[in-house]
Amino acid sequence: DLQLTQSPSALSASLGDRISITCRASQGISNYLNWYQQKAGRAPTLLIYAAVNLQGGVPSRFSASGSGTDFTLTIRSLQPEDFATYYCQQSHSTPWTFGQGTKVEIK
Amino acid sequence: VQLQESGPGLVKPSQTLSLSCTVSGASVSSGNYYWNWIRQPAGKGLEWIGLIYTFGATGYNPSLKNRVSISLDTSRNQVSLRLTSVTAADTAVYFCAREGRYTTSPQYSWFDPWGQGTLVTVSS
């Protein structure tokens, strides 16, 4: 199976901070990479699809980059509602797989 | 489009887990969509279980070997999941999610929307 490794696994940040989360694939996956946000007790929601495309309704402080094996999700100016766990997911080859998640906590 | 999972919250070991995902705002039998099941054990990450295409083709995670099957009930506009011979390791929140795909190459795809999830506990 294609493995996705996120880093860091957790991070503490303050309101207004800029943070980045990295997702590395075990093999090249072009732009077949999505990002999701999951708040405690809720289902994940789509933030970014095809590596760089912002899902409709998602605030513009979220952005993403990358292609091949290395991808980054960036949140500019953290807001209270952004404290959550973030997952990357590949749609290059089945079985679809997810990264292990990055929990963003309040410092 | 909204998805809602339903089914027993408690299943005994060795028995069969059966869940339904009721879809509103879209038809499970039309459109270029795939209907997926994904699960998440408490405090852990997400595991893809499998999918079914609008026209009935299926794909499953090999990790679940031959225990899983997914089907469509077009009369009820539902997507169903069956997982046989369950053990405590199958205890998780089970989500259904619609997978959209580009119709032309490259066929990027993504999960949106998701159901709220339903907790299934395997215990005697």
Image (spheres, coloured by chain):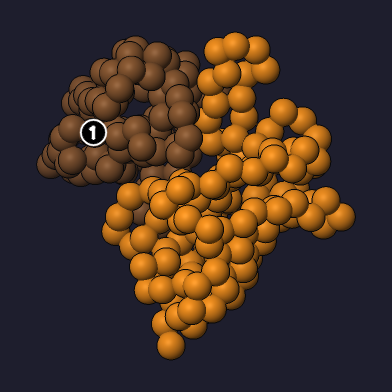
The percent coordinates of residue B60 (x first, y second) are 54, 47
Reading the image, the residue beneath label 1 is A6
Picture layout, residue B65 above or below residue A46? below
Chain B: drawing colour: orange
Is residue B7 something that shows in the picture?
yes
Give SS at disc 1: strand
Q: Residue furthest bottom?
A: B124
Q: Numbered disc 1: what chain?
A: A
Rendered-image quadrant of the N terminus of chain A = top left
Which residue lies at the image location 42% right of the left edge and 15% below the top edge?
A31
- Nearest the viewer among B50 and A65 is B50
Rendered-image quadrant of the C terminus of chain A = top left
Is residue A65 something that shows in the picture?
no
Position of A36 compared to B72: left or right? left
Which residue lies at the image location 55% right of the left edge and 13% below the top edge?
B106
- Nearest the viewer among A27 and A30 is A27
Instruction: Write down which chain is painted brown.
Output: A
Position of B37 compared to A104: left or right? right
Q: Quadrant of residue B26?
A: top right
Picture layout, residue B21 above or below residue B122? above
Which residue lies at the image location 27% right of the left edge and 43% below the top edge?
A100
Give the amino acid at mark 1. Answer: Gln
